[in-house]
Image (cartoon, rainbow, N blue to C red):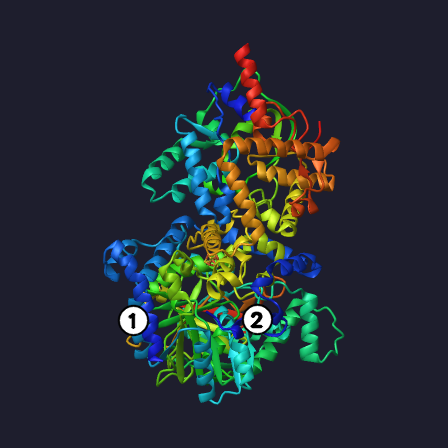
């Protein structure tokens, strides 16, 4: 379980947390700039995936294959991790094991200090967000530079990512122009709105210097290949490759769940990943890194370290949430989630947003620290139909609700309401009576207009829509009357 | 009522068991498995003697078909009965489409453009998509104009809309916009929850589109006020 | 630290044993054959493989030309520099195929790794796949990785017999190398790009802004 330090995040992020889902969501809905950005992202991502999948003959079969690969790897995780470790070592790399986020931070910090690192480049990795690595390195006096453009933008803005593959999708061009003006031009441009190519080129130039002067490069890993001891890195920008190739030390951080048996298995998963994430058949750069620079290599780092993190994953392996460990972090679930589409990623309050986050966050930070997340879903099921490894996300959310109910961390009103309703529903006579009284009452309240604009106890509903008052007699009464009339006839 | 009539016209004898209450979905979705289980047992018991159980609401049907067996798995006494009920249960439009009833003497009439909202449980758990559309083809004068994002959730989600009303409202507003863009004069659906949600929002906004359960249109009863409107 | 390792493995084994006892004890290779013995689902095409490759290069915004002999590489590089209005200088990988070439006098050709401000790099691909229009470059004395990522323009020579239909075939080919796996196997599909600003695709993020492929017999 992450320590408090991991939960308190950098900059503005410090204020947000999974406990505060409701107010954060409310604020997001009112944020016009955010809504503008979200509207664009929603259409963009779903369209791209649709096209990507359309051109594949049998995507369902591919999903099934992906599911089986991931299940198999999880079912034999111990064997594959051992193999992975020995192959990394055989290639001249070192493997480190971290039980939790604090251990992982200490290991990485130690390695950087050993290298006397002043500047560290990073290529986007959700797991380093999970362990809150950047603040730890910064506290030790290191210059930590995010190199994925989106991640770089939000690093300047001192915000956490709001999406697992498009960390800055909540930022508009105007906001990015302003940030670049402040940090690259000391405000000389007076926040002038600039064109996209100009912004991209400017970031490229600024970051080029950082790449070339970095002492350590830190990446995550999309997959770990047991067969060869390779880590797989997928990017479109090429930043991961500059990160691991140029400095003297490459540190890769990965969850133990990322291991897959063979290169061929990774291949199938890559076919799923690109299409599900960005609709691409293949991202621009997919790299298999195995160990450090060889003796006769002209470039590459002298040292390679793989930090393998548990942080609650082995616990997930044993219980009803094992399916979640299949996740390949493609973001399709959040891209197709109407709740995510309405409020964006920050409202979820921790590293992983959207449907996968609503499952993962309570499992990582504790159900009592993320009460709202399992409920922040209509169980509409769209996420599960696009998930490339067929994770039954709605079922897992329902399971979390049930755990919550059992552990008694449901708010009192809900519990009481359910009790009363459940009691009635088990007593057909009473239920019938109650609904009859209820529906009369509603009809009277509804008056001539036939709809209610305020409803006692369900204030939420009626603040934004009317509650249709029951029309005429209740179905049960109508039915009785009809049967009687028939009998008489 | 429209549903019952449709079934009778198709030649079935329809009964509504006296002791029937709720399928237990709210409890199941709120994590109260014990209560959901009890309600499931109650429903299974009450429905044990019927050849077909036809449910006019997608989410209730999905609860009975997809979730009762999960809920009662491992319960020796009830497990098989749950499967048996699931086997006999159909969502209304699925049942009607399967029964492939001959068009009745007086086909329903509903002149004008309508659009159809796929309710999530029906669509994804029961793969109800083509059935209502097929059935609607038999309605005289009706043209189906699909809206954008017809398969995107309307934001109802049972207790969701009570717990997170603002998010729910945002979602249903999107839905209403899509409905309006389609130019339809009525929106049809197969799930009462969604329809109430959508109708409620449309009325609040003063959108002149009516909401009907698909059964109402199929039975030729959609000449009166839409859901939530006063006649 | 070995404490951590032991504890993690103990937790994994405990979690898995519970299941293994239920589902019998298959060795991982036996269990894997339940899916791995069949060809995975993958995209098909009904045009010649090379055509598929070229189409996919186009789709990835890479450019290409087909040369009649590897001796034509020098002229093709020269022409490329002129077309792009670039200085007559190129950094080349120390690959036998390139070392055998006789470069024209007016072209500055330096072997080695890439450096800051490099305009043009030239490498030889170890393989390519038609499935997605991807070039595969393995790090090693004959192919510095920095050359793939630092220059503004990356020119890549592809011997045609190295073109394979699928990624699985590429693995088959690479596994034959004595140095397999090299430090870095790079799958490159088109020039570098980003969509991080307002979801709009922009070429030339951190890696090369253009990628040009020279197919040789
Ligand atoms: S849960 Fe599925 S869809 Fe969501 S990120 Fe993970 S793999 Fe992708």
> Dot 2 falls on which chain?
A
- Mark 2–mark 1 Cα distance, whole angstroms, equals 33 Å
Dot 1: element: helix
Tell me the quadrant of the picture where the N terminus of chain C can be found.
bottom left
Q: Residues within 10 Å of mark 1 (few under 14, many from 20)?
A: some
Question: Residue A313: x, y in percent?
Answer: 40, 65
Q: Examine the rendered structure and indicate whether residue A94 appears above or below residue A35.
A: below
Residue drawn 70% across the image and 57% down it? A30
Say whether disc 2 or disc 1 marks the residue closer to the N-terminus: 1
In the drawing, does residue B51 fall left or right of residue A335? left
Report if residue B123 is visible in the image. no
Question: Residue A477: x, y in percent?
Answer: 58, 24
Tell me the quadrant of the picture where the C terminus of chain C can be found.
bottom left
Question: Residue B107: x, y in percent?
Answer: 57, 19
Q: Is the residue marked 1 within 8 Å of ligand 1, measured from its CB?
A: no
In the drawing, does residue B51 fall left or right of residue A75? right
Residue drawn 45% across the image and 38% down it? B39
Residue drawn 52% across the image and 46% down it? A380
**Residue A83 badge:** 1
Report if residue A191 is visible in the image. yes
Dot 2: element: helix
> Dot 1 falls on which chain?
A
Residue C177 lies in quadrant: bottom left
**Residue A151 badge:** 2
**Residue A100 badge:** none
For this rendering, which residue is in front, A52 or B100?
B100
């Amino acid at each position: 379980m992450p320590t408090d330090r991991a939960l308190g995040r950098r900059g503005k992020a410090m204020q947000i947390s999974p406990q505060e889902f409701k107010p954060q969501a409310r604020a997001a809905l009112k944020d016009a700039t955010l809504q503008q950005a979200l509207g664009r992202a929603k259409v963009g991502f779903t369209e791209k995936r649709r096209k990507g999948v359309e051109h594949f003959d049998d995507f369902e079969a591919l999903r099934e294959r992906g599911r089986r690969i991931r299940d198999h790897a999880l079912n034999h995780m111990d064997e594959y991790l051992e193999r992975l470790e020995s192959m990394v070592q055989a290639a001249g790399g070192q493997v480190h094991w971290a039980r939790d986020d604090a251990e992982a931070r200490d290991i990485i910090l130690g390695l950087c200090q050993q290298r006397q690192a002043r500047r560290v480049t990073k290529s986007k990795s959700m797991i380093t967000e999970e362990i809150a690595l950047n603040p730890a390195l910064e506290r030790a006096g290191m210059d930590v530079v995010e190199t994925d453009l989106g991640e770089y933008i939000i690093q300047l803005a001192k915000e956490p990512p709001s999406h697992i593959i498009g960390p800055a999708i909540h930022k508009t061009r105007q906001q990015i122009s302003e940030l670049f003006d402040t940090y690259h031009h000391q405000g000389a441009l007076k926040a002038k709105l600039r064109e996209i190519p100009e912004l991209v080129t400017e970031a490229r130039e600024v970051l080029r210097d950082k790449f070339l002067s970095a002492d350590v490069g830190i990446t995550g890993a999309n997959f770990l290949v047991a067969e060869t001891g390779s880590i797989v890195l997928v990017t479109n920008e090429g930043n991961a490759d500059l990160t691991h190739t140029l400095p003297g030390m490459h540190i890769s951080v990965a969850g133990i769940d990322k291991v897959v048996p063979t290169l061929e298995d990774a291949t199938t998963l890559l076919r799923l990943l690109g299409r599900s994430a960005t609709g691409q058949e293949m991202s621009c750069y997919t790299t298999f890194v195995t160990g450090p620079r060889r003796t006769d290599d002209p470039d590459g780092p002298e040292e390679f370290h793989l930090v393998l993190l548990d942080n609650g994953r082995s616990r997930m392996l044993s219980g009803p949430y094992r399916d979640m460990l299949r996740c390949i972090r493609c973001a399709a679930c959040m891209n197709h989630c109407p709740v995510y589409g309405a409020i964006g990623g920050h409202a979820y309050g921790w590293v992983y947003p959207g449907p996968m986050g609503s499952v993962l966050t309570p499992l990582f930070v504790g159900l009592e620290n993320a009460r709202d997340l399992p409920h922040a879903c209509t169980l509409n099921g769209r996420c599960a139909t696009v998930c490339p490894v067929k994770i039954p996300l709605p079922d897992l959310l329902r399971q979390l609700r049930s755990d919550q109910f059992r552990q008694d961390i449901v708010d009192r009103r809900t519990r009481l309401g359910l009790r009363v309703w459940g009691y009635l529903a088990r007593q057909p006579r009473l239920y019938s009576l109650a609904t009859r009284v209820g529906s009369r009452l509603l009809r009277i309240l509804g008056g001539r207009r036939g709809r209610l604009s305020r409803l006692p106890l369900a204030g939420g509903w009626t603040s934004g829509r009317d509650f249709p008052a029951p029309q005429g007699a209740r179905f049960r009464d109508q039915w009785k009357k009809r049967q009687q009339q028939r009998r008489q006839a | 009522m429209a549903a019952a009539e449709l079934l009778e016209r198709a030649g079935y004898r329809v009964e509504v068991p006296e002791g029937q209450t709720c399928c237990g979905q709210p409890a199941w979705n709120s994590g109260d498995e014990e209560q959901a289980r009890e309600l499931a047992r109650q429903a299974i018991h009450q429905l044990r003697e019927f050849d077909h159980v036809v449910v006019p609401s997608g989410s209730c049907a999905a609860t009975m078909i997809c979730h009762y067996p999960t809920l009662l798995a491992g319960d020796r006494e009830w497990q098989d009965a749950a499967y048996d009920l699931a086997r006999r249960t159909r969502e209304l439009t699925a049942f009607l489409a399967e029964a492939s009833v001959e068009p009745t003497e007086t086909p329903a009439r509903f002149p004008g453009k309508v659009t159809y909202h796929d309710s999530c449980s029906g669509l994804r758990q029961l793969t109800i998509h083509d059935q209502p559309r097929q059935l609607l083809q038999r309605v005289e004068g009706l043209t189906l104009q699909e809206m954008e994002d017809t398969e995107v959730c309307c934001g109802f989600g049972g207790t969701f809309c009570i717990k997170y009303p603002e998010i729910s409202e945002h979602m249903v507003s999107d839905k209403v916009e899509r409905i309006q863009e389609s130019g339809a004069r009525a929106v049809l659906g197969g799930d009462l929850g969604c329809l109430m949600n959508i109708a409620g929002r449309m009325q609040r906004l003063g959108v002149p589109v009516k909401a009907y359960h698909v059964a109402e249109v199929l039975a030729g009863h959609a000449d009166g006020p839409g859901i939530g409107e006063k006649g | 630290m070995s404490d951590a390792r032991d504890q993690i493995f103990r937790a994994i084994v405990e979690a898995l044993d519970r299941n293994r006892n239920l589902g019998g004890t298959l060795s991982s290779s036996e269990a894997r054959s339940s899916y791995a013995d069949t060809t995975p689902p993958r995209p098909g095409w009904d045009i010649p493989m090379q055509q598929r490759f070229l189409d996919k290069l186009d789709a990835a915004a890479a450019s290409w030309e087909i040369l009649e002999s590897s001796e034509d590489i020098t002229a093709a590089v020269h022409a490329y520099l002129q077309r792009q209005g670039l200085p007559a200088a190129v950094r080349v990988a120390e690959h036998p195929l390139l070392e055998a070439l006789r470069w024209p006098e007016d072209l500055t050709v330096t072997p080695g790794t890439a450096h800051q401000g490099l305009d043009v790099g030239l490498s030889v691909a170890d393989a390519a796949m038609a499935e997605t229009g991807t070039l595969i470059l393995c790090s090693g004395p004959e192919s510095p990785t920095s050359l793939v990522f630092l220059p503004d323009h990356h020119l890549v020579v592809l011997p045609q017999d190295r073109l394979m239909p699928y990624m699985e075939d590429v693995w088959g080919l690479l596994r034959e190398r004595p140095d397999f796996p090299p430090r870095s196997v790079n799958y490159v599909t088109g020039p570098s790009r980003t969509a991080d600003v307002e979801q709009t695709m922009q070429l030339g993020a951190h890696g090369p802004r253009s990628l040009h492929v020279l197919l040789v017999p």
